[in-house]
Image (spheres, grey):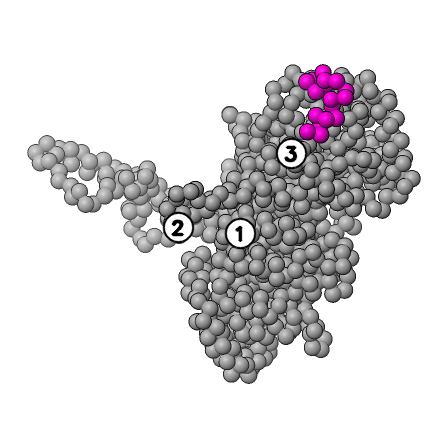
Amino acid sequence: MANSTDSSHSNLKESLVAHSQTRQENGQHLLESSSSEAPTRDPSVPNLHKLLRGKGREWEVIGAKPRPLQLLDLPVDILRLIVKEVTHTNDLTSLALTNSKLYSLTVPHIYARFDIVWPDDTVPPSDSKNVDALTYGLATLCLGSKFAQRTKWLRGSSMAYSQPSQRLSDNQYAKYTRKFSLGNGPKDWTSEYMVTKESGKMLGTLVAIAVGKMVNLETFVWDMPTGVLSEVFMALASLQDHYPEGDSKLEKVWVRWHDNSEIPDASSSISSPIQAAPPPPPLAVPPIGSTVTPIGNTLPHDFHPPVTQPITYSESHVEYPTFSVLPPLKSLTVLDIDELAYLDEMSVLIERSRSKLRELRVGISQKARTADFAQAWDGTTLQQVDHDARWPGESRISDRRLGGVLGVLVGRIYDIRRKSTMKIQEKEPTDTAPEQGSASQANGGEEFSSHFNAVHQLFEHTNTSMSSQAHSQNQQQTNSATARGQSNIRPCADRKRLDGKLQLETLELERVSLSVQVCTKAVDWSILTSLTILDCMFVEHLWRALKRQFHPTPPAHGSPAGAPTQYHLALKQIHTDTTSNTLISFIKETLAPNSLEVLFLQDRRRTPGPAVKLDQIFKGAIKRHRSSLKKLLLDSSDESGEVRRWTSWMLSSEIVCYITSGRMPNLKELSAAFDFKDWHPFLQRLPNIPQLRSLHIPHMLEHIGNFEPKELALQLIDIITLRPEIQLCYVGIGAKCFEILETRPSDISNGGSDGLGGNHGNGAIVIDMDDDNDDDGSEADEETEEDDDDVNDDNSTGSQADAGDDLTDVSDDAESETDSLREGDLVGSAARLRLREILFYDDKVAIFKARHARL
């Protein structure tokens, strides 16, 4: 292959020279004859040079070919488009080994994504030899091809003393990487890479070296809770040095932090600059007599926060620098935060990215959710951030921050205080409390004070001794820091008040104590389209404030008949694990009809039953947005696994009939509990929702006999066999997940298997190069089917009855079809359906990922 290719290239060169000479002679002849006769051109024929767009020379070479064109004779641009359609890694590798030209075109696609996917902890280990993709993959990215070529020379290869290949001499694979991702996995596996151990230090160093070479990196994901070295952040920051204007291609950073409270074991590095973390902080108990304002829990007017002393880097038990050195980002995700220092550095990055940031995801660690910095506070002497601190270790303000976590994040673009602190301080002490009270009233303090009991639900397990100890500690801090607290807030009066807003499109919060004023004032809600709030305090106050602030504007008096109501919110996706009547009222009255596309409602509160009935959700949210809903999840089960609690939101027969009536033409993903008596009616009416792509049934009530998820999935295959227009692909029933595949007889004869999908079954780390497209089907086909299914109630009812009769009549044929499929007796060339048990595709199917109720 290589010899024939080289000869073809030499022939190309000879033909090119001959053709260019002939073209020059013809050109001279045309110039001589042009003086006597002016050329005429048909205006309807387009100019060929304009269509070629600078590729005229390649076109001339192709036109001079004496033989029919072959694949390699096509222009490079066309070959690049052909290679782009090949998505499987094995196919790309085969193309790269075929020809040098194809090699140069496929290598950028092979190394475009570096995804480490850990195997599931339930998969048994394999005895076969496994390749540690994490180690070998990083070695390839760090060393490049020069290292491998030099190794062959030193080992006495036949290539010794030969001229190195120019094609491989400078092939740095890291420069092609656009996405670098380290996924999360079983704790027994990932714990070996903790940042406090030698192996974690080596992993961080390898990643830093590789990332420093990824000049085209767009996405960086570290979802492994092992910690990230500061060297990795410095490598990400150095990417902007490769561009003259300093604007790197990095747009998305996703980091999941480790638990800093864990004490390193004997294998940890002694020389590591990260010191052992102190014990977990005590519970943050609100002071006695405090109330709740739109900013947070109020503190007494005579409370003065303690002044912390700056520390050195050797005394810090967290990495520095981290986020503060990164270039402006479009998407920022930081999860499991357990240190205030991370929030301070994130505030610097958010200020730098204020005009570019579109996605923000923040999650507080489960162990740190009760710490002082994780609570939303309100007091006259509190600040959001220390503007004079050059790094978090120099901060002189306490852990109790104005506005809590959200107040710190927006502390450099938005000031919560309406008046400068200096003016407040100049007033008499007797006027401070009334002024604070009036400010609270102006911002809805009366309403929030009435709901103060919700604050103490988190602290019910706190005993009296801990509360009194915290109260006495606050008193000591007040007495010792009264004088020093005055100097703390002096620089704030010299600054101009910040009043910026984040232009976010996606906002996701987990275990964050909400500051309603920050949420409503520091975020532009006219742009926000996706909102996720999981296990957050004061979420009820947020729904109530949004409903009051963005209430629809009716047509003005004197407007023509039929004038539409003006809606001010652009929300299309809502996910929350605390469903309430306030939320349903917000969805019904504040959002425009048929505008909500994704609705994930869960109720994880430890109560006997959900506060909202299923009929209220159906009438207030589902029915109002029936034409626009694409993904729907309803789950009332709690984390304790209380028996029968999930039956509160089990779909009733009426709702099942409504969903399968064709009146929800865009529904593609559905997750809800079913009653077994409604299962067969659902199967009969499944053809009315052919666009459904994913189905998740976590619970099934009153199932007859043993509950076998595979048998229910096979019943779905029977229906799809009879009605091929149904697009159902992924089915999750209970703890099992299945994929419905089309199989042809040629695939079975070549050795198809029904094992687990992907390479997850071998017990090794694998590199996943597949695309993350949620929708694999054609959008045009889906829209056509949606138009056909959008019928009125009378017609749809009749078609459902007919469809049910047809399915009943041919049930025996469906069983025989399944039996022949399972026996492998495939006759003819038509595609048959096959059921494959897989792991839940959390990355590809939104309802599968949302079922965990966490970011």
Residue with the most extreme front position? 558
The CA distance from mark 2 to mark 1 is 23 Å
Question: Mostly what secondary structure, the magenta segment?
Answer: helix
Which residue is drawn at the image coordinates 71% and 30% (left, top)?
A: 437
Asked if labels 1 and 2 touch by Cβ distance under 8 angstroms, the answer is no
Q: Which residue is mark 1?
A: 596
433 falls in the magenta region: yes
Task: Report whether residue 513 is seen.
Answer: no
* Residue depicted at 54% across the width and 26% down the height: 246
Q: In the image, which residues are magenta?
A: 422-438
Q: Residue at x 79, y 40 (%)?
A: 370
Q: Earlier in the sequence, mark 2 or mark 3?
A: 3
In the picture, measured across the screen, residue 389 lies left or right of residue 532, that is: right
Q: Nearer the viewer, residue 717 or 147?
A: 717
| Towards the viewer: 497 or 450 | 450
Please, what is the three-letter code of the amino acid marked with disc 1?
Leu
Is the residue 563 above or below the residue 751 in the image? above
* Mark 3, residue position: 443
Residue 178 point in image, percent of width and height: 56, 41
Q: Earlier in the sequence, mark 2 or mark 1?
A: 2
Of all residues, the one furthest to the right in this rendering is 465
Q: Nearer the viewer, mark 2 or mark 1?
A: 2
Answer yes or no: do the residues labelled 3 and 1 have beta carbons within 8 Å?
no
Secondary element at image label 1: loop
User: What amino acid is labelled 2 in the image?
Assistant: Gly
Identify residue for label 2.
562
Amino acid type of the residue tagged 3 in the rendering: Asn
